[in-house]
Amino acid sequence: MPLRRQPPPAALLTSPEDTEAQFYEALQSGDIERLMSVWGDDEEIACVHPGGPRLVGAAAIRSSFEKIFATGGVPVTPEQVHRLHTMTTAVHHLAERITIHTAEGTQTAWVLATNVYLKTEQGWRLVVHHASPGSVGEPPPVMGEPPSLLH
Amino acid sequence: MPLRRQPPPAALLTSPEDTEAQFYEALQSGDIERLMSVWGDDEEIACVHPGGPRLVGAAAIRSSFEKIFATGGVPVTPEQVHRLHTMTTAVHHLAERITIHTAEGTQTAWVLATNVYLKTEQGWRLVVHHASPGSVGEPPPVMGEPPSLLH
């Protein structure tokens, strides 16, 4: 039986969590091809970077990330992820922790993000990434969250 | 045959456009009950006001809009609406025009918003409203949009 080549990991996208993990891994490593592979095949996919304009469509989104990756990957990790799932849609809202090492020490900036994933024939795909400035230092509060929340 | 009382308009929500229209009408009129009636019945519904924290759940969202409405409705109209629809999900991203009349004249501020609607047994319901500061004066550019776009 011949060896069969495994499909590349980016093609799996078997769950919203898988797609989200690949999105942030691609951001961290500055891998533009992997980053673009998680987006849906729709001309209305949209992206808002913190404080930035609205980017619509793959070409505009790709161009913005190419500029960001010109200085390398982004040291970002998703935290405080809240999920709202149906059979075909996943809405995640979360805080992105961005860690910056400077001569004065390590600084942490937080970004609030909404990520929307749709289930397609090509797996779960990102269709919206909307990010806006959160806070610096302490993580941004989540209003309405029970104080004992463990997830 | 007895007269039957009509259900209130807010209970219809027959399309994402209907739900979105009611959301902005409620914002304009400062009608907290109508505003809350368009939201989905899920504890993970979420709202981010421009520059604000993450609000999760109906109680936190209601409280934030009650504070906003304490000084009246919000002179906001949705424009430049982009839509990404499936059978059960609608993702809208748009620019909110906020018109402020001052002694120095009329000023226009723009907010970038992502609204996500899910089709439920109670009609199309809002589950996420994520808004972030756009621009003042001129409408914010939409990068990637064809120059001749008419919608």
Image (cartoon, coloured by chain):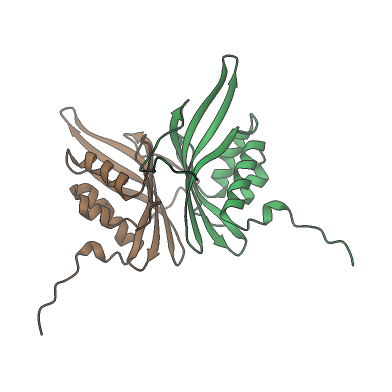
Chain colours: A green, B brown
> How many numbered circles are shown?
0
The image shows residue B2 at horizontal and vertical percentages of 9, 81
| Residue furthest to the bottom | B1
Looking at the picture, does residue B3 appear above or below residue A85? below
Rendered image quadrant of residue A31: top right
Q: Nearer the viewer, residue A110 or B135?
A: A110
| Residue furthest to the left | B2
Instruction: Judge from the rendering whether residue B84 lies leftward or rightward of residue B95; answer left or right.
Output: right
Q: Nearer the viewer, residue B138 or A83?
A: A83
Which residue is depicted at the point 10% across and 85% down? B1
Rendered image quadrant of residue A119: bottom right
Instruction: Judge from the rendering whether residue B14 lies leftward or rightward of residue A9; answer left or right.
Output: left
Q: Nearer the viewer, residue B65 or B57?
A: B57
Q: Is residue A55 visible?
A: no
Instruction: Judge from the rendering whether residue B9 lies leftward or rightward of residue A11; answer left or right.
Output: left
Q: Is residue B43 visible?
A: yes
Looking at the picture, does residue B29 appear above or below residue A102? below
Looking at the picture, does residue B106 appear above or below residue A35? above
| Residue furthest to the right | A1
Q: Quadrant of the C terminus of chain B?
A: bottom left
Looking at the picture, does residue B91 appear above or below residue A143? below
Instruction: Judge from the rendering whether residue A42 lies leftward or rightward of residue B47; answer left or right.
Output: right
| Residue furthest to the top | A104
The image shows residue A137 at horizontal and vertical percentages of 48, 25
The image shows residue A80 at horizontal and vertical percentages of 49, 41
The image shows residue A141 at horizontal and vertical percentages of 40, 35
